Image: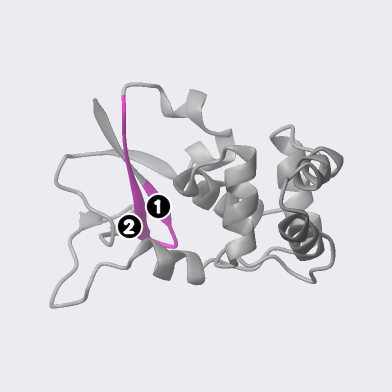
């Protein structure tokens, strides 16, 4: 297994341990933010091209996934749906899956969350519901989110 770190704003936000080539697992824009690392690198370490990876100094706690997600930028509906389109997910397909939920109130609420929003927040629980519905694991969604912010 090879260890990789996904870097966001100079900070290691995810460690990926895999035998698969990163460029086959992720879109090229996301793969560009992922570097091979030694086993000791952890989430919360800093990274600068000139200095490499550095462990946090002092007693600064490692950010939790929730803290990292809360700090992610909001996406406009345009960014959100363009990114979805680039990974072959259409708005129509998403809405069809939402409408097929057996809990009609949950389906109605989720439809409103994704069609009537001014911006998408990664920390919104509706985004996690949608990802689960689409079979996208949270860590992969985090990578997609960061990538989508560039549109």
Asked which quadrant contains residue 127, the reply is: bottom right
Q: Look at 22% across and 53% down and name the residue there.
A: 42
- The reply to whether the magenta stretch includes residue 22 is no
- In this view of the protein, which residue sits in the foreground, 92 or 139? 92
Q: Classify residue 93 as left or right of residue 148.
A: right
Q: Look at 74% across and 32% down and name the residue there.
A: 88
> At which x and y percent is residue 17?
29, 34
> At which x and y percent is residue 53?
23, 53
Residue 71 visible within the image: no
- In this view of the protein, which residue sits in the foreground, 48 or 63? 63
Asked which quadrant contains residue 63, the reply is: bottom left
Give me the disc on residue 74: none
CA distance separating discs 1 and 2: 10 Å
Residue 42 visible within the image: yes
Give me the disc on residue 48: 2
Residue under numbered circle 1: 7
Q: Which residues are magenta?
A: 6-18
Is label 2 in a helix, a strand or a loop?
Answer: strand
- In this view of the protein, which residue sits in the foreground, 55 or 71? 71
Q: Could you tell me how many numbered marks the image carries?
A: 2
Q: Earlier in the sequence, mark 1 or mark 2?
A: 1
Q: Look at 35% across and 40% down and name the residue there.
A: 35
Q: Choose mark 1 or mark 2, whichever is in front.
A: 1
């Amino acid at each position: 297994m090879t260890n990789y770190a996904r870097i966001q704003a100079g900070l290691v936000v995810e460690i990926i341990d895999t035998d698969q080539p990163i460029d086959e697992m992720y879109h090229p824009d996301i793969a560009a933010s992922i570097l091979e690392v030694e086993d000791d690198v952890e989430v919360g370490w800093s990274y600068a091209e000139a200095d490499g990876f550095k462990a946090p100094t002092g007693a600064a706690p490692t950010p939790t996934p929730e803290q990292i997600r809360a700090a992610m930028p909001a996406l406009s509906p345009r960014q959100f749906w363009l990114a979805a389109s680039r990974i072959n997910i259409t708005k129509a397909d998403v809405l069809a899956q939402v409408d097929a939920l057996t809990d009609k109130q949950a389906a109605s609420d989720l439809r409103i969350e994704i069609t009537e929003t001014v911006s998408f927040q990664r920390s919104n629980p509706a985004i996690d519901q949608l990802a689960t519905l689409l079979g996208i694991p949270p860590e992969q969604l985090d990578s997609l989110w960061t990538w989508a912010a560039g549109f």
